[in-house]
Amino acid sequence: MSTTQDVRTTPAPRRTPAVDAPAPPRRRLPLTAIGGVALLALMVLLPLVNLTVPGVLPGPTYTAGSLNLLALCMVYASLALSYHLLLGTGGMLSFGHALYFGAGAYGLGIILAQTGIPLWPAVLVTILGVMMLAVVTGAISLRVTGIPFAMVTLAFAEAGSVLVRRNPRDLTNGGDGLIMNSDPVPEWMLGVVNTRNLYWMSLVLLAVVFLVVVWIDRSRVGHVTAAARENELRVRVLGLRPYTAKLVVFAVSGLLASTAGIMYLFLHSGTTPTSVSANLTITVLLMVVIGGVGSRWGAVAGAVVYTLFNQRLTKLAESDFVAGLPDAVRIPLSQPLFILGTVFVLIVLFLPGGIAGTLSAVTARWRRTDRGAPHGAHRLEQAASESGPIG
């Protein structure tokens, strides 16, 4: 008797046609980068065109006065970017940042006047010397945090200011300021005729400083410093060394400030003790706050707006129009610092995010509206976000 076994066969799986995997999305340049490149190109061409901005620039853009004012704006923008590394990236409130700006200006001026070193080697020696100064002062200041840190940096700045005013061995010329020795300086950097060249040098400096700040912000050191700003204890628990990261950021910030000071020396053919004083640090702090703390573009915008306001309000205070006003109006308008202080208070009260924060909020609101959601949906989302979870 033969037995048969039933063999059950399973149907072969159907083969689906091969589907091409979706191509990875192309990385598009952000609008800020495109706008920055376009603005840089415009600034490069500005000395070659006849553009007049009434009330902002003293004349057409190709004139020496306008180019000098714009170059000064870019020097202070570079200084504000260097301070952004301290306050925006590291959360370090420093009242002594002007020490490194003034050290760059006075250091190069003293080297050119007292030695026979050519210009560019002297610039390199100055930058290295200021970086060593920043490392030493930063290593001491970073032993404490918060208000004590701010007080220690203020003490270093005041020591530098006193040293400059006392004119040791006739090096700094005291309160009269130091005049740059023009013998080692090339002719294309001297005189009113060559203001255009100094303008382009200031623009190159601003672009380089901006790129360095972006690199630091996106580097491991920048990430550790930003994390320590939020919770330094947690960073230490993770096995990282926030002190070293903050010291590197502090040193780079001082180095960048020294390059701005060197450019300031070239632009004004000298420097004064105000470039080392704590008042300059307060001014830079105002620039960063007006532009928006934590924003690189905000630091640049705040520096430009503050410098233009300061220069033009000084001219307004000295004008015949203000002199003919009643005393109740003339006295406040004749004090540019009073007007700038009022503007600063209004920005802190009504625009706490500064220029950059306000523009970001407006852009975000415009994008939400552009998605096409009904107006009622926006109302519901806003109410939910304000009320929080129920129960």
Image (spheres, helix red, strand yellow):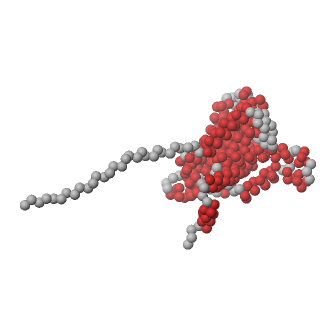
Question: Which of the pair 237/327 is nearer the observer?
Answer: 327
The reply, left or right, for residue 250 in relation to residue 338 is left
Question: Which of the pair 175/219 is nearer the observer?
Answer: 219
Question: Which of the pair 282/135 is nearer the observer?
Answer: 282
The reply, left or right, for residue 145 in relation to residue 266 is left
Q: Which residue is drawn at 78% across and 51% down?
A: 340
Q: Which residue is drawn at 92% across and 48% down?
A: 324
Q: In this view, does 118 lie above or below 261?
A: above
The image quarter in which residue 57 lies: top right
The image quarter in which residue 61 lies: top right
Where residue 122 sits in the image (x, y, percent)?
Answer: 66, 33
Say if residue 177 shows up in the picture. Answer: no
Where residue 380 sits in the image (x, y, percent)?
Answer: 61, 64
Q: Residue at x 57, y 70 (%)?
A: 390
The reply, left or right, for residue 130 in relation to residue 9 is right
Q: Is residue 195 above or below residue 146?
A: above
Say if residue 296 shows up in the picture. Answer: yes
Q: In this view, does 199 lie above or below 365?
A: above
